Image (cartoon, rainbow, N blue to C red):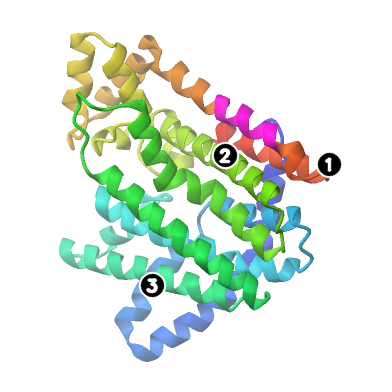
Amino acid sequence: MKDNLVLSYLENYSKKTIPLFNYFFNAKKNEARKIGANPYDLLKQFIKTAILGKKIRGALMVLGFEIAGGKKLEAIYDASLFIELMHSGLLIHDDVMDNTDLRRGHPSLHKQYSPEHLGKSMAINAGDLAFYLSWEKLMNSNFPTERLILAGKIYSEFLTRVIYGQILDIVPDNNKTISKTNILSKLRYKTAEYTGVFPLLVGAILGGMKDEKKLRLLKEYGLALGWAFQIQDDVLGLYGDKEKTGKPVGSDLKEGKKTLFVYYLLKHGNAKQKSFILSILGNKNVNSQDVNKAQKLFKEIGAYDYVIKLGWDYVKNGKKAVPAITSDKKLQKILTSFIVFMMERTR
């Protein structure tokens, strides 16, 4: 990371919110304990994973609030927990659908119970619980009612779009019809919008922003940031460090994900190259040698450079909106650094 500005911003966000997380969850643990041992145990397992995230979305919500000129920083830090709770719930459900073994360096929640059906059932409940706790956190935050109502409408809209994106992701593509447009559509609805647009928009709304032009530009910037985030996620999925990402390298191949890497190879590769990739895509027996071969193949054919360039193109486009979003030079620098960070991050 060339610029430590974002890392400092994220570190400060984490320091501010960890005590708030603990306070909130301690109350919830007391409630769950009174109901029974199993609800209490599930909540404890959820808490372990919820507090380990990068907290990018929560930090972006605070940034959106600051851009809007919001002054109640203590209130926005507390309210921002809602988006981290929502995010954790989405990840738990996503891990069930993808049958992912690891999340944030630990066994996925559904893998922490046996037998398998119990694990999946508990994970579904944990994800649902996260959404309701998220809603409670947002609606109980210290902001004017009219702003909370608007934020609630945005929450409903974006969560619905994430679910539609998840449906696009889990239904297999025909190898002959896979397209860049389809892939980017999945990225947009499943991840990009709720990673970039959603937190900035909710933060700005709670901060009192009403300027339609600025809100539109904030959405454009947020979408570019979200796309860059997901593209780098795909890069890290193939070329990242397991110790940093918390999940095995090549897991996207094993799960059969039709990423931009796969799209490019199927479009430009020869018959032998296509045959190899299709033979390991969705194959649960993929080993490290297969992954290494795929890594080399994607670089040799130009897929790696293609994906990296696309990510940086989104960064470039997003940066163009910054001067019109805010005239505050410090906030401009943070916005610029944040979107660059999406492509420079290693976890």
Mark 1: secondary structure:
helix
Residue tagged 2 = 225
Q: Which mark is residue 129?
A: 3
Q: Is residue 198 visible?
A: yes
For the image, the number of numbered tags is 3
Query: From what the image shows, is residue 205 above or below residue 149?
Result: above
Whole-angstrom CA distance, mark 1 to mark 3, is 40 Å
Relative to 339, does residue 97 appear above or below in the rendering? below
Specify start and end residues of the magenta stretch as a single range.
312-321
Is 218 in front, or is 15? 218
Question: Residue 253 appears at what percent x and percent y?
Answer: 28, 32
Q: Amino acid at mark 2?
A: Leu
Question: In the rendered image, which residue does mark 1 sit on?
Answer: 329
Which secondary structure, mark 3? Answer: helix
Query: Does label 3 or label 2 sit earlier along the sequence?
Result: 3
Q: Contact (CB < 8 A) between labels 1 and 2?
A: no
On screen, residue 27 versus residue 286, left or right, reads right
Tell me whether circle 1 and circle 3 mark residues in contact (CB < 8 Å).
no
Residue 317 among magenta residues: yes
Residue at 42% from the left image edge and 59% from the top image edge: 159
Assess whether residue 345 is covered by the magenta stretch: no
In-image side of 170 versus 142 (left or right): left
**Magenta highlight: main SS:** helix
Percent x, y for residue 275?
17, 17
Give the residue displayed 47% in from the left and 16% down from the top: 305
- The answer to which of marks 1 and 3 sits earlier in the sequence is 3
Q: Quadrant of residue 144?
A: bottom right
